[in-house]
Image (cartoon, helix red, strand yellow):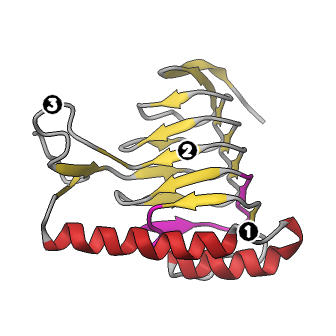
Amino acid sequence: MANDDRTKIILRRTPESAVMSAEVKRAMEITADLNRLTFNDADEVRALFSILIGKTVDANFVLIPPFYATGGNNTRVGRNVFVNQNCTFYDLGGLDIADDVMIGPNVSIITSGHPLEPAQRRSSVVAKPITIERNVWIAAGATIIGGVTVGENSVVAAGSVVTKDIPPNCLVGGNPAGVIRSIGD
C-alpha cells in the first residue's frame, strides 16, 4: 500500500492499535457525558469538548449535542466555530478546523478508513489529515474524507462527499464533490 508523509497506517494487534482503541474508549465516555447535555448547557459542552480534544476551546465555540467522536487528541478547533447536532469527527489522521467555520447537522468528518483490498481490509486502519480553512461552511449531511483540504471561504453543499482538495472561495457539491461556481464577498 502506498504511503506518503501525511498517511498514518496502524496495523492490528500492535501497541499503536492498543493506543487507538484506548483513545476510542476515552472519546466514547466523554461524548456520552456530552450527549446528556442540551443546547442550554453551552458552558458544560465547551468544557467537555475541551477535555475531549485536550485544549481549551474559544468562548464562542458552539456545539449542539448529540456529537460523536472516535478520538479528540488529534483535533484542533479555531475561534468562533459552530458545530450543529449529530456530527461525527474521526480525527486519527489529524483534524484542523480554522476560525469562523460553520458545520451543519449530520456532517461526518472522517480521517480514517481501511485498505481497499479485501485481504487487507481488516489488517489496518489508514488515516490522512483533514484541514478546514477559515470561514468555511459545511452544509447538512456532507461527508469530508481524509487527505482533504477545504479552502478558505468555501461552501460544501448539503449531502456532498468531498474526496479531493477544494479551492478557496467556491461552492462545491455532489458525489464526489466538484466546483459548482466561485463565490465572493
Q: Nearer the viewer, mark 1 or mark 3?
A: 3
Judge left or right: residue 68 versus residue 118. right
**Marks 3 and 2, Cα distance to the nearest angstrom?**
24 Å
Write the start and end of the magenta stretch as one range: 70-85
* Rendered residue at 18%/51% (across/down): 124
> Can you identify the residue that label 1 sits on?
61
Q: Which residue is mark 3?
A: 117
- Give amino acid for label 2: Ser
Can residue 98 be seen here? Answer: no
> Which quarter of the picture shows residue 21?
bottom left
* Predominant SS of the magenta segment: loop
Residue type for callout 3: Glu
* Residue 59 belongs to the span the image colors magenta: no
> How busy is the neighbourhood of tag 3: few (under 14 within 10 Å), some, or many (20 plus)?
few
| Of labels 3 and 2, the one closer to you | 3
Residue indicated by mark 2? 108
